[in-house]
Amino acid sequence: MQQLSFKNRIASHYIVTTALLISVVFFIIYSIVKFSVYSHVNNDITSEVDKHRSEIEIVGNSFHLIHKEEWKEREHNTLDVNPVFIQFVDQNRNVIEKSPNLKKSSLIFNENNAENKLFDTKLADNSIRQIQVPIYQKTKIIGYIIIAMSLEDATMVLNNLFEVLLIVYPLILMVLFFIARFIAGRSIKPISSIITTSNIITKDNLTSRIPLPQNRDELYILSQTINNLLDRIETAIEREKQFTSDASHELRTPLTVIKGTLEVLIRKPRNPAEYEEKINFCVTEVNRLNHLVDQLLLLARFENQKQSLKIEKVYLNAIFLDTIARNSTAIQSKNITITTQFSRDYYIETDSYLFLIIVNNLISNALKYSNQNGNLTVLIKSLASRIECHIIDSGIGIPADDLENIFNQFYRSQSNAHPEIKGTGLGLSIVKRLCSLLTIDIAITSEENIGTRVVLSLLEVDLK
């Protein structure tokens, strides 16, 4: 079974709701008209009752009409215009007198509606509305006035109204369906734009965007959300392309150096010292290559930012002290003075393995770019409900123009000015990614030839 289009489904749902609403409205209209018509007839009958009760003369246990000329009135004498049927019966239900328009017919006394109750009945196959009013001699009923009015005009009005509503109902629904379908088509036009744009978007064409509707409605939000998604996808793919290109370049460089060294080495016989020198150089490059691969794998591992984190309570002081101890060789080789300022024990809840990578990268960076006989200070302090970790070095510093790029992959500030400082340019990229993953704020300030300050802001654990 073929499903309706989205446009037709909207129109159909609208029509179903409208059909229910219109049926209720039509029912109310019909009920109001019927009530109005019957109220008019009831008022006329009640008026006739009051009028004829005042024209009755009671003598003993009998009664008669005082003004006989009453029967000459048109409504009592004819059947063409608003006929009113009058009939007097005694207590035995025998007809005493009746209006001329009844002719050979008689109004039937209804025992179930004996007193002052309006009801519908028949007179020679014609619908009438009737009332039976008792006539009293003191407390004794000596007869009844039976008054009735024709319902033919009222029935005709109600039947005509019902037929009109019955005919108009499907016509209105049909017209409303096409109107709703047209409006729905106009309303979902942005969806057509979304489909068209989506069809032309490929991995090689991510620049197209969905035109935003003028009305800031749900479709506007949907279009804007999809455009934002495309922006993120385009950025991610561009970053991946750049990462692949940079990684290929960085990996190719040490491989080229190793290949060139080995080719030079085998061109002619060498003495053992030369072989040893070139082999040690190649080993150094292989180690650099291994470190680069490790960094690339680490960065790729946390690229998705959906890794399962092992959150636990971490003793912050120990993390920094252990990291400093592991870097003791670099500290001693540069004769760097280490200062730690921990006023008390600090605890946080985080993934200890990932946080250790952050701290290790930052401290090793600080040592790498520190001058001989420099200083490195690690300061931890509380600030409201957060903890700030400051890593301060007295190294070569970072130019102001480079600060905004230091978290980019493979970016190395002043790499040409200081070729003796080796690196991959991935350390701070990894730090930034892990800080984002662990919800840690990181800020870096620096001045050339003065030093660099890195500040980590974390949420403190309440031990109470």
Image (cartoon, rainbow, N blue to C red):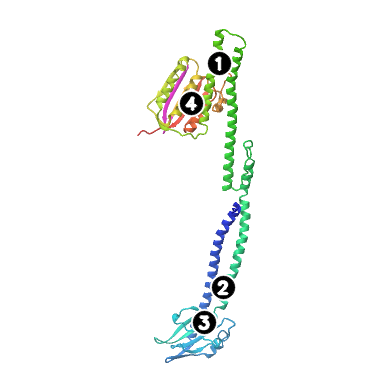
Labelled disc at residue 121: none
Report the magenta residues as a range: 374-387
User: Which residue is the site of mark 3?
Assistant: 148
**In the picture shown, does residue 438 fall above or below 166?**
above
Q: Secondary structure at mark 4?
A: strand
Of circles 1 and 3, the one toward us is 1
Q: Is residue 134 left or right of residue 125?
A: left
**In the picture shown, does residue 419 fall above or below 344?**
above
Marks 4 and 3 sit apart, C-alpha to C-alpha, by: 103 Å
User: Which residue is the site of mark 1?
Assistant: 282
Asked whether residue 341 appears in the rendered view, the answer is yes
Q: Earlier in the sequence, mark 2 or mark 3?
A: 3
Q: Nearer the viewer, residue 268 or 125?
A: 268
Give yes or no for residue 265 being in the magenta stretch: no
Q: Secondary structure at mark 2?
A: helix
In the figure, residue 352 lies in which quadrant? top left
In the figure, residue 11 lies in which quadrant? bottom right
Type of residue at label 4?
Val
User: Which residue is the site of mark 4?
Assistant: 454
Q: Secondary structure at mark 1?
A: helix
